[in-house]
Image (cartoon, grey):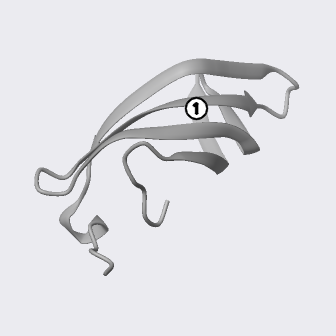
Amino acid sequence: MLNPEEGEVSTLSRAFFFYDGVEYYAQNAGEIFFTRLDTANRILSGRFAIDLFCSEGSVLQITEGRFDVRMREEDIKVIE
């Protein structure tokens, strides 16, 4: 995500996830909603929903995911 904004919904273009020793992947199969973008405290929060697929044919469906991430200083760039 190059420039997330609070209240913005975006499509997840690619994602990878490891669960129970299996690698899952997704391409254009989910959405992410940013609920908080706090550049002063370097916190990005949000919710997401995604369908993850594995090569064995199983699907891991996440419908009410949420996250709180502390961003690195070098990840924060102000674009004017």
Q: Secondary structure at mark 1?
A: strand
61 left or right of 1 in image: right
51 left or right of 5 in image: right
41 left or right of 15 in image: left
- Residue placed most toward the observer, 75 or 18: 75
Residue 47 percent location from the top left of the image: 46, 30
Quarter of image, res 21: top right
Residue 34 percent location from the top left of the image: 42, 41
80 left or right of 26 in image: left
Quarter of image, res 66: top left
User: How many numbered badges does the structure rendering display?
Assistant: 1
Q: Residue at x 62, y 21 (%)?
A: 62
Q: Amino acid at mark 1?
A: Phe
Q: Is residue 57 above or below residue 11?
A: above
Quarter of image, res 58: top right
Residue 1 percent location from the top left of the image: 49, 59
Where does label 1 land, which residue? 18
Q: Is residue 62 above or below residue 69?
A: above
Q: Quadrant of the C terminus?
A: bottom left
Residue 65 percent location from the top left of the image: 50, 23
Quick one: label 1, few (<14), some, or many (20+) residues within 10 Å?
few
Q: Is residue 17 above or below residue 10?
A: above
Q: Residue at x 70, y 21 (%)?
A: 60
Q: Residue at x 38, y 31 (%)?
A: 67
